[in-house]
Every structure is written in structure tokens, then in C-alpha cells.
Amino acid sequence: MQNLQRCFGHFAPTLEFLALSEPKGSCREILYLIGLFPNLQDLKLCYPLPREEQEVAADTALVPLSIPPLRGRLILTCFTRRRLVEDMITFFGGLCFRCMDLFRVNCVQLLLDACVETLERLRLYPTDPYGEDIYIY
Amino acid sequence: MRWHFDLSRNKSFRTLETTAQSISAAGNAAPGFLKAVLSTIPSHLPLDVVITYQDLDVGYFVNTWAKFVRVTKSPEPSAEDARCHQKRFRVLSEIFRVRKFRLVLCADVPDCIAKYANWVLEDIVEAERKNGGLGYLACGPSIVTETWVPRVHSRGYRVGEAGNRAIYASAL
């Protein structure tokens, strides 16, 4: 975690868009990275294929250093880490994205409900298998 | 088959967006999916439905995986292309029965082909209008363009932007 701060900490004052391709690590570690940027508005997390994550033991001492506003766009692709979304809601005191682009996301309804006051624009795909009710939990 | 994305509680919701490619790829499932989503949006809210067209949908291919950005234009639109556009418009007229909306066609393309993409979308709308397929709309579809600057892919993951700089990391 010290490495992350050393590598990316200098972007903290200006970074507004963070895109992570197939991020590894625990939900808390990803949350910590997101929290490094207090002015973050847009977030993109992409995986090549949906798969059930084996969540590594949470480091409970690891808490985000800031609560970024995250009022812009959320883009999730093949995203099955519901726990990360739940942690974001808990640690950031809810979510307030205005735009979402979701494909193969197993927690769509959780996200829609979390942004119930703010969501203005949503991109969905008719090819999304998670649109079937059997996948929503 | 039932679909369950429920937007009934989202008070600020104004725009539902999808892609031309996904409508075509979903085939017969597309109207059911979109109808189910639309039916959950409160009817008193104004709604835009945005269909996004990418380079291939408008007859161009912008290759960013090569060392340089390369643009290839396909030959004149084929009969198959025309059928594909007609099928999408049929899906839209079908879902309009469930929930009224304003139709927006959006070219989401690299800036180097934006002008051409806009012309192609105008032609697509004109062809559909001649076929009498847009009569259900209160006003004609809007055509908008969202452009981006193509960048050739470098090694490592692009993790974000600060100002006009892109940030790459090869080991996150």
C-alpha cells in the first residue's frame, strides 16, 4: 500500500478519472487505491470475463484515506465483486454517480438503488445475461 | 424470460442508453429486454433513449492497435446493412408502445470520422423516414456526435487521466 501511495500519490490533487483493468487484490485494497484520489469523479473497472472472485481476507485496518466525490460516470464490465460495491457504499457514505455504463454486472440493482437520487443516465446492453432475474441477488 | 432492472425509484433518471451493436446482437431478445427496463421508468418523467453507433456501425474501422491510427472505410452500404438498420428501428417502434421517449442517435466515434459518421446517421434516418418508419415519434430523432481522440495502445494499463495526461501502470 505504501507503494501505491508513492507511485500515484502525486496525482491525488488532480486525478478525476481512474480506470482499472482487471484489478487484483482485496476489495479493501482497491478501495484504498480509490481513496487515494480525493477529487475522483469517474471510475471504470473492467474485467475480461465474469468470474466469481475468491475474496482474500479483508485487511480491516486498511481504510480509504479520503472520500472522493464520485459524482460522474461509473463504468463496470464483467464485474462480479459485489462486496466492493457494498464497501464503497459503507465507507463513502453511499454513492452518487450521475451516469452508469454496466455490462455483465451482478449487482446492478444494488447500484441503481444506491444512486436513487442522482442517477440521470444509464447505459445497458440487451445482450447482458445479468438482465435475467435468475442472476440478480 | 423475465428481465429485472428496476428504475422505478430513480427520481432523476432522464436517459436510457444502449448500443446499436447490442440491439442487433441480442436479436429477438432485444425488445423484451428494453421493454422491461422502460416499463419501470415512471411515465411522468421526460425520457431520452440514446442509441450509440460506433465506427463499424457507420461503415468505418478505426484501428488503434497498430503503431499508428488507421482508418478504413467500408465499401458502399450493403443491403444487409440497410436491413440491420431497419430491424433496429423496428425494435425502437415496438418499445415505444411501452413508454414514450425522444429518440437520439449518437455517433460515438474518433474525431477523425465524426463528420462522416454524422452524415451516415442522417442517411439512415432519411431512409427510415422514406420507409414511413418514424411516424410514431412526436419529433424526429436527434443526431448527436460524441468524439474522442484515438490513442494507439501502449504497454501497460491506462489507469487514469490528470489534465491532458494519461497515466499508465503495468503492475497494479
Image: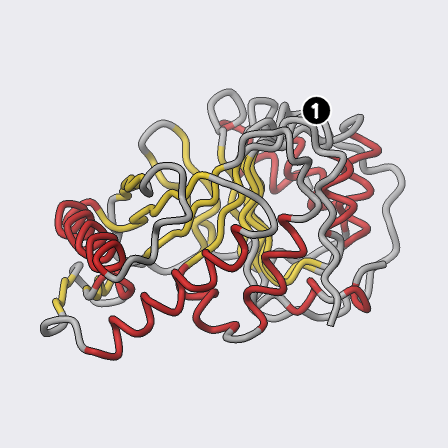
Where is residue B101? Give x, y as percent: 50, 40
Neighbour tally class for label 1: few under 14, some 14-19, many 20 plus, Cα within 10 Å: some
Which residue is pictured at 21% across the width and 59% down the height? B127
Which residue is pictured at 45% across the width and 55% down the height? B157
Colour basis: secondary structure
Q: How many numbered marks have been drawn onto this rendered protein structure?
A: 1
Where is residue B123? Give x, y as percent: 17, 55
- Relative placement, left or right, of A2 versus A12 is right
Where is residue B170? Give x, y as percent: 47, 56
What residue would you read off at disc 1? Answer: A67
Q: Is residue A103 above or below residue A111?
A: below
Please tell me in which quadrant of the rendered image residue A80 appears. bottom right
The one nearer the camera, B27 or B150, is B27
Please tell me in which quadrant of the rendered image residue B87 appears. bottom left
Chain of the residue that carries numbered disc 1 in the rendered image: A
Q: Is residue A74 above or below residue A134?
A: above
The one nearer the camera, B1 or B110, is B1
For the N terminus of chain A, give its image quadrant: top right
Helix, strand or loop at mark 1:
loop
Q: Is residue A83 visible?
A: yes
Q: Is residue B152 above or below residue A63?
A: below
The one nearer the camera, A21 or B115, is B115
Q: Is residue A42 visible?
A: no
Residue type at mark 1: give it.
Ile
The one nearer the camera, A12 or B13, is B13
Where is residue A58? Give x, y as percent: 87, 50
- Relative placement, left or right, of B95 versus A109 is left
For the C terminus of chain A, give its image quadrant: bottom right
